[in-house]
Image (tube, rainbow, N blue to C red):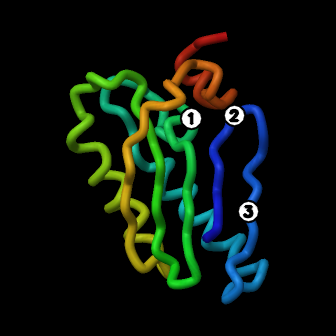
Amino acid sequence: MNDVHSDAASPLEVKAPSAMTPDELRVLTDAIIAALKTVYDPEIPADIYELGLIYNVDFDDSRFVTIEMTLTAPACPVAGEMPSWVENAVGMVPGVAGAKVNMVFDPPWDQSRMSDEARIALDMW
């Protein structure tokens, strides 16, 4: 499996699955991140990737993607819908075989996971 971690404090680190060249890995990773950045919490003007809601993205040699994500709060009104939004966005990436989201709440999300881009969008300095 290939891990793509979201952490506002550190850059993404990825290892190529055995069937992918480094260039293929970079292109697929960039496309998955771009797809994640199209999904927004309707109540927050920042995408889920920049908010730090994506905890882990794994993809295997078959290019099936498994995503661990959280919400800003467990009682989020779109908790039932957001996983399918993420699965649909990532599933549309060329070369991705499919996507599955696993919701996790440990560790709990907090504002330290937000990127500088999200902090600027939300005026949270």
In the displayed structure image, the side of residue 74 where residue 30 appears, left or right: right
Asked if marks 2 and 3 touch (Cβ < 8 Å), the reply is no
Q: How many marks?
A: 3
The residue carrying mark 3 is: 14
Measuring from the top left, give residue 100's x and y in whole percent: 37, 61
Question: How far is mark 2 from mark 1, CA to CA?
Answer: 7 Å
Which one is in front, 106 or 8?
106
Amino acid type of the residue that numbered disc 2 sits on in the rendered structure: Ala
Q: Secondary structure at mark 3?
A: loop
The residue carrying mark 1 is: 52
Amino acid type of the residue that numbered disc 1 sits on in the rendered structure: Gly
Which one is in front, 28 or 112?
112
The residue carrying mark 2 is: 8
Q: Secondary structure at mark 1?
A: loop
Q: Residue furthest front?
A: 106
First along the sequence among labels 2 and 1: 2
Asked if marks 2 and 1 touch (Cβ < 8 Å), the reply is yes
Q: Which quarter of the figure is the N terminus placed in?
A: bottom right
Q: Is residue 93 shown above or below 36? A: below
The residue depicted at 38 percent of the width and 73 percent of the height is: 98
Measuring from the top left, give residue 73's x and y in whole percent: 37, 22
Q: Is residue 81 shown above or below 113? A: below
Q: Secondary structure at mark 2?
A: loop
